[in-house]
Amino acid sequence: MAAPVRVRFAPSPTGHLHVGGARTALFNWLYARHHGGAFILRIEDTDRSRSTEENIGLIVEALEWLGLDWDEGPPAPGYRQTERLPSYREHAERLRAAGRAYYCDCAPADLERARRAAQARKETFRYAGRCRDRGLRAGALRLRIPDAGATVVNDLIHGPVTFEHGQLDDWILVRSDGTPTYNFCVVVDDVTMRITHVIRGDDHLSNTPKQILCYEALGYPVPEMAHVSMILGPDRSRLSKRHGATSVQAFRDAGIVPEAMVNYLARLGWSHGDQEIFSRQELVELFDVKAVASSGAVFDHTKLAWLSHEYLKAMDGARLAALATPFIRAAGLAPPADPARLSPILDTLRERARTLVELVAAGRFYFEAPSAYEPVAAQTFLTPEGARRLGLLRERLAALTEFTAGALEGATRGLAAELGLKLVDLAQLSRLAVTGGTASPPIFAVLALLGRAETLARLDRARAVAGGAA
């Protein structure tokens, strides 16, 4: 019987979570949920100069925003590398005692000179093994790599990848100051956490043969490996800040909805036929790491914005209100005191907005009266004749028993007929008066949502401006 699937996401907390890391986390999460396994969050914080509590918080915040919950990990103890140093020391001693590792006292300056010389010859630097058989009792601890043969990485995405041992060197497990290296920590953490599948970026593929040899030297089974290709910019270079936003938080702050971000990242290198939009449950049911493409995927900001728009249109009203409220406040506006009033307002805006930022900007007039009017429209509508029409319209609307969209349209249509006007003439006049512009959701729905008192007050203000234009 196969062991239960256990996967991990192991970021180094050096800043905001990059979308590449977020996709890796998502693929691991989907694989675990698909197989009923465990998703583990492990913090690789051995770089003390860059691994701060603030940066750890940023990673946790990004994962929570994406809805990627973990079964094991912080804040529980034992899931940060700085908490696991005794385990690294124990495994290092096991390798040394078994003769699979040896101490090296080669000076870093000498090694650097040899590295530069190899570069000058356009060769890959490989430690010459000077200390292999010296029997030293102290120094940096190196893993003894076999001289002959090859290690094959049977990658679930790329297929078999062969690394000749002649390409590898006796890499350092523990530095001379006693600190373990990244590659060694990864192996020890994965075996002690019983990780069955390692899904990570293909920038780690070159490290994999070294790690496999370390697993074997320790006598542990090697996890299944899957290396996901890099995310590319439109120019097919590795996605970076010069291509625009790259962090999860940047897209969140730009108003992309989290459901769209998850959907987009899942489709970035993985597909299921021509289907574009997936519920989270569909992703869990359908995801297969073996179906992930081996070539790099180009990040398309336009496609992400389209997905965000699709989710905004279809989203449950309560969910949309919860997502939009922080953006309303961030714009310096106050959401309605009665939360039940917010969903109908957002329903009039969601069809055209691609992001929550756009949604709030388009509906700003719902939360505050316009402080100015579009200049060209004002010259056309806010005239003495416009003031007269606004006065008549105000009287007609104030007399309504029910302040509903249907009643408002009926009253406006009747007044337009009496004045020999088209409905659009009074509709645009009232739109300018209450929103400050000439584009808005259906105006009678807007008036009904603003309510009687606010609508009449805005008509009065526009009438005063129009009357003063004489």
Image (tube, rainbow, N blue to C red):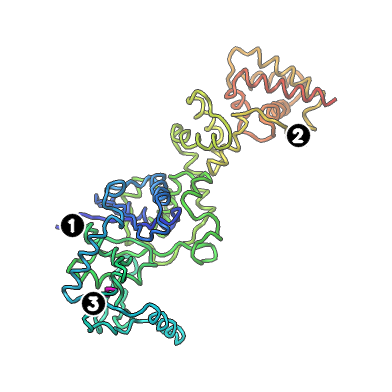
Does the magenta portion include 161?
Answer: no
Residue closest to the eye, 274 or 194: 194
- Of badges 2 and 1, nearer the viewer stands 1
Q: Is residue 209 visible?
A: no
Q: Of the numbered discs in the image, which one, if any, rests on residue 3?
A: 1
- How many marks overall? 3
Q: Is residue 199 above or below residue 404?
A: below
| Residue 331, position as x, y percentages in the image | 58, 37
Q: From the top left corner, tell me how far across and down residue 211 is, in percent.
A: 28, 69
**What is the C-alpha distance between the residues marked 1 and 3?**
33 Å
Residue 377's tag is: 2
Q: Which residue is the site of mark 3?
A: 102
Label 1 is placed on what type of residue? Ala
Residue 214, placed above or below residue 10: below
Residue 205 place in picture, x, y as percent? 35, 69
The quadrant the N terminus occupies is bottom left
